[in-house]
């Protein structure tokens, strides 16, 4: 059974528990699905973000920026990670982003609420709170991220992260809820 990751309320009965990240959805999509179920191959190819994993020496996975492909209900943007040259475009990572323009404190509050809601429907996960860290994407050293990671026993995880970007970098502060398979996580 799929469980929708929402902002405030997870729609579920009290007897529903998630066993792994494929039991969750972001905007109707799940890890393990094919992007072709939702978008045409031409649209997918047009929205591949070539530099997203520029720090990696091998190009095993790519990111598809889905923001321009759909008007989403809960998220301002959605990203999916798929293997390079996979003509089925199977999703190994999926993340939804919610903008918090100049309002990072609300992001932290929402981050905690999302973690609480997910913990209502998952069992047997370990929690790793990493606190505030500097972003490697900002050479000024002023941008930070704060992540809470829910680790499943099979190696998959859900990351609930607030990004606090410096004005110099020009990105929008946001909350990102990401579902990452063990295979993608090991590569990252």
Image (tube, grey):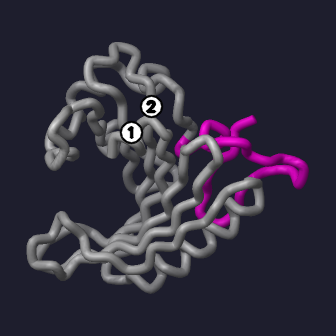
SS under mark 1: strand
Query: Looking at the image, which residue sits at the far top?
Result: 87
The residue depicted at 63 percent of the width and 73 percent of the height is 113
* Residue 19, horizontal then vertical, whole percent: 72, 42
- How many neighbours does mark 1 have within 10 angstroms: few (below 14), some (14-19), or many (20 or more)? many
Q: Nearer the viewer, residue 118 or 47?
A: 118
* Quarter in which the N terminus is drawn: top right
Inspect the magenta stretch and tell me whether residue 106 lies in it.
no
Inspect the magenta stretch and tell me whether residue 19 lies in it.
yes
- Specify the segment rendered in magenta: 1-27
Query: Looking at the image, which residue sits at the far bottom?
Result: 105
* Residue 57, horizontal then vertical, whole percent: 15, 39
* Residue 105, horizontal then vertical, whole percent: 44, 86
In the picture of the structure, the residue carrying the numbered disc 2 is: 91
In the picture of the structure, the residue carrying the numbered disc 1 is: 80
* Residue 110, horizontal then vertical, whole percent: 55, 74
The residue depicted at 45 percent of the width and 43 percent of the height is 94
Q: Please tell me which of labels 1 and 2 falls first in the chain.
A: 1
Q: Label the magenta part by its dominant secondary structure.
A: loop
Q: Quadrant of residue 2?
A: top right
Q: Quadrant of residue 183?
A: top left
- How many neighbours does mark 2 have within 10 angstroms: few (below 14), some (14-19), or many (20 or more)? many
Question: Where 74 sits versus 170, above or below?
Answer: above
> Is the C-beta separation of discs 1 and 2 under 8 Å?
yes
Q: CA distance from mark 1 to mark 2?
A: 6 Å
Q: Is residue 61 left or right of residue 107?
A: left
Q: Nearer the viewer, residue 170 or 178?
A: 178
The residue depicted at 43 percent of the width and 60 percent of the height is 176
């Amino acid at each position: 059974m799929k469980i929708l990751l929402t902002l405030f309320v997870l729609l579920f009965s009290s007897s529903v528990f998630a066993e792994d990240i494929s039991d969750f959805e972001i905007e109707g999509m799940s890890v393990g699905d094919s992007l072709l179920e939702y978008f045409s191959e031409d649209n997918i190819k047009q929205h591949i973000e070539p530099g997203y994993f520029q720090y990696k020496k091998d190009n095993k996975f790519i990111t598809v920026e889905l923001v321009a492909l759909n008007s989403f209900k809960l998220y301002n943007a959605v990203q999916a990670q798929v293997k390079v040259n996979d003509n089925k475009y199977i999703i190994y990572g999926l993340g939804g982003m919610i903008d918090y323009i100049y309002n990072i404190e609300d992001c932290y509050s929402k981050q905690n609420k999302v973690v609480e809601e997910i913990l209502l429907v998952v069992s047997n996960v370990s929690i790793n709170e990493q606190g505030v860290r500097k972003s490697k994407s900002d050479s000024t050293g002023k941008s930070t991220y704060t992540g809470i990671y829910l680790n499943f026993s099979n190696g998959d995880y859900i990351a609930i992260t607030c990004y606090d970007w410096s004005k110099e970098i020009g990105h929008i502060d946001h909350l990102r809820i990401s579902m990452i398979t063990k295979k993608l996580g090991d590569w990252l």
